[in-house]
Amino acid sequence: MSKYAKSAKRYVKAYFELAEQSGKLKEAASDMELIRDVIRQNAELQSFLRQPIIGSAQKYNAIQKIFGSKVTDLTQRLLKLLADKNRLDILQDIAELFSEHYKKHLGIVEAVLTTAVPVSRDIIKAFHEKVKELTGKDNAVLQTEVNPEIIGGFILQIGDLKIDDSIKGKLQKIKSNIAV
C-alpha cells in the first residue's frame, strides 16, 4: 500500500498530462519541487493543511501568500482546484508524487546509501556504479545518509529494493531465527 493518498495519484496524473501537453512540464516540476520542499521543511504548514477544522478558503489564502507569484499559472490553477475541492490536505502528497513521476519520466533512478559512518568518495563512486549496474540506468542519483544505529555495514535502498548488509540487520535476522 502506498503511503500517498489515492486521490493524490489522480491529481498528479491529470496535472502531469496537462503540463506535458502544454509544454510546461519542466516548469510544473520546478513548482512541485518548490512546494514539496517548503512543506517538507515546515511541520506547522503540514499540520495546518491537514487540519479538517480549518476552512479551504483560509488554507488557500495561506498557500497564496507562501507561493503566490513563485509558481506558474498552471500550478495556480491546480492550487485553486484543490481549494475548491477542499483537498489542499493532500498538496504535499501531490508534490512528492509529481516529483517521483517526473524523475521516472526522465529515466532518473534514485538510491539511498545508509552507513554508520561517513564514507569516502571512492566508496560512494563504487556504490553509484553498482546502482547503475543493478538498475540498468545511467541516470542514477545516489544520496548518502549516516545512521550510527546500523552499527556497521550498509543499507542500499533503490526504490522498493532494499539491500541490508548492516550489522544491525544481521543481528535482527539472527534474533528472529533464534526466536523461531
Image: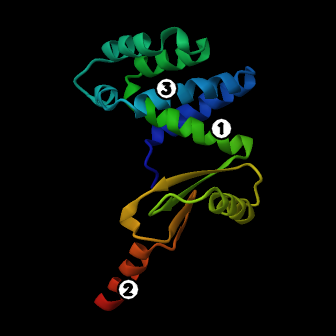
- Relative to 70, say whether 179 is above or below: below
Of residues 104 and 11, the one nearer the viewer is 104
Q: CA distance from mark 2 to mark 3?
A: 43 Å
Which residue sits at x=69%, y=26%? Answer: 26
- Residue 37 image position (x, y, % from top left): 48, 31
- Residue 174 image position (x, y, % from top left): 37, 86
Left or right: 157, with 128 as reference point: left
Q: Quadrant of residue 125?
A: bottom right
The residue that disc 1 covers is: 102
Which residue sits at x=37%, y=80%? Answer: 171
Label 1 vs 3, first from the N-terminus: 3
Helix, strand or loop for disc 2: helix
Residue type (three-letter) at the residue carrying disc 2: Ile
Which residue sits at x=57%, y=23%? Answer: 31
The residue that disc 3 covers is: 35
Of residues 167 and 36, the one nearer the viewer is 167
Q: How many marks?
A: 3
Of residues 41 and 14, the one nearer the viewer is 41
Residue type (three-letter) at the residue carrying disc 1: Tyr
- Residue 107 image position (x, y, % from top left): 73, 46
Residue 174's disc is 2
Residue type (three-letter) at the residue carrying disc 3: Ile
C-beta proximity under 8 Å, tags 2 and 1: no
Helix, strand or loop for disc 3: helix
